[in-house]
Image: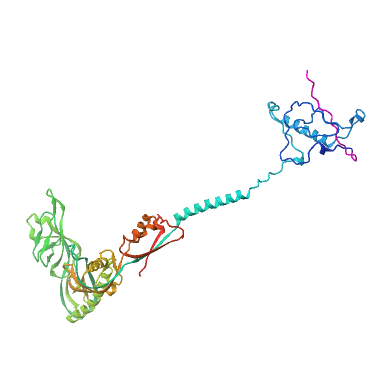
Amino acid sequence: MPEKNTPKKVSLKVDASTGKFVVSDILSTRKSTRPAVLRKKTTAPSTDLPATAFERPHPTTTPSDRQPFVRKDDSSLPAGMPHDPTPLEEWLEKNKQDRMERQSQMPPDTHQSHMEELPAPEEHKMLPRRPAKTHPKRRLLLVLAALIAFGAVGYMASEKLAKLYVTVYPRIERKSIATDIIVSTATNGLALPAELITFTHTQEQEFPASNLSDIRKKASGTIIVFNTISSVPQRLVANTRFAAKNGKIYRIQSPLTIPAATLKDGKLVTAGAVEVVVTAQEAGTDYNMDLTDFTIPGFQGTEKYKGFYAKSKTPMVGGFIGKSYAPTSGELAKAEEALMPDAKTKAASELSQKIPAGFVLLEGATEFASSFRTVDREAMPDRQTFLARQTTEVRAIIYKQSDLVARLAEANGMPKGLVDIKNPNDITLTVSHRDTKAGTMTLRASGDATFLWRVNNQELARALADAKSTANFDAVFKKYPAITKAEYKFSLPWVRTIPANLDYIFIETKEN
């Protein structure tokens, strides 16, 4: 049976002044960077140590709970004599108690399977790990790599965000022009396209009347005549009678044609209708009446009597017999003279508001046709005024300014649609012939014109973006005869790639 391995007594140094063991001979004074770990108990071979010197125990030779270290001079003490514990004994006892407390808190099945951890004394506690020193060359390489990566990212970002500024100088040509141009509303492709504006301006005003006389006036009003049975127009002669429901007769003053009705399978789809003014057959207030229906007595006894009829559009008014004030011939002339200029001025003002943007109305391209009359109204004995009405019919021929510039450019050997006139006010335009009813006029253009070639900036920006590099700029600009010279620069001087985003390309036009 092998001999049981037991710890041997070790000679320890004793401080002569205190009589205590010198602990430094057992524990190293060097601070540990790791906590001490109590490994599993193992049976170590017996080792004889010299009695005169002490060596550190091997990590596996931890003092036993059953056989603690003894004093060097225990043999000299009487048996059973108590002695003061040394610091080493106190430390070992404290560790034993801590270890037993931890084992009691662990599950039973883990007491043997886990290694016990022995805390280090306070002077051996773990200190913070110092950061590893970086070699200067390695640090420099890291900095250079970061700078290169940052520069590469910045360069790629600058390629995307850089802006391109282009300045182009368009072609300019100066020409002396003298040409006649036909303007017409007819779309024949030969004349300059035009549009015709027509409208009527009406102005009314009260004027004094001083001629008191016997007045016999007939009532009048407007009616709408309908055709509901005939698919062909119906003509009525002047003075055709229309009878109101109360039997009063009114007549038309001139011939009238009633439009045809629209029929389908003998049934009415749309009635033919026309407006006309009728006048009472006799003077007097008896013929003044509100809205009513009318028949045509001339058709009585035929199917047309029910198929043709009329309805009032306005009341019948103005019928009067008695004394009333009326204007003299002189008062009529003064009224017309007062209304005429004002009516024409207001008609011209109304015309200017009807001209669309981009169109031109030349002086002499407008016709004014005026008519003057008194307005029929109910006569009153105490009314010493009359109402005068001035009606002005306006007809004007207008054309687009861009069409005129294109026609002048074409007449001087330049492509139309690519050229503007820089000084349009220096070109004299006069109307030599006008026929507003036919919608035509002839104008003469003369003067020194400066033709400025037009550059489509949006189209040019797209072409530059497609070129991708400034090396292809010359090929792009050669495709634009309107450009004589071009300059460019980038917002970042090292960039040479053209932005793909058109919002980053800015084109400015300058004249030489």
Q: Is residue 218 visible?
A: yes
Q: Is residue 199 visible?
A: no
**In x, y percent, where is residue 437?**
16, 68
Compared to 350, does 85 lie above or below? above
**Magenta stretch holds residue 15:** yes
- Looking at the image, the residue that sits furthest to the left is 301
Left or right of 52: which side holds 261? left
Compared to 250, does 145 lie above or below? above
The quarter in which the C terminus is drawn is bottom left
- Looking at the image, the residue that sits furthest to the top is 1
Most foreground residue, 180 or 384: 180
Compared to 327, does 80 lie above or below? above
**Principal secondary structure, stretch drawn in magenta:** loop
**Which quarter of the picture shows residue 247?**
bottom left
**Magenta stretch holds residue 70:** no
**Which quarter of the picture shows residue 241?**
bottom left
**In x, y percent, where is residue 11?**
85, 32
Q: Which residues are magenta?
A: 1-18
Left or right of 12: which side holds 108? left
Left or right of 326: which side holds 8? right
The quarter in which the N terminus is drawn is top right
**Which quarter of the picture shows residue 183?**
bottom left
Most foreground residue, 436 or 335: 436
Most foreground residue, 96 or 295: 96
Left or right of 511: which side holds 280? left
Q: How many marks?
A: 0
Most foreground residue, 168 or 281: 168
**In x, y percent, where is residue 173?**
29, 70
**In x, y percent, where is residue 209?**
21, 79
Compared to 93, does 194 lie above or below? below
Q: Residue at x 69, y 29 (%)?
A: 114
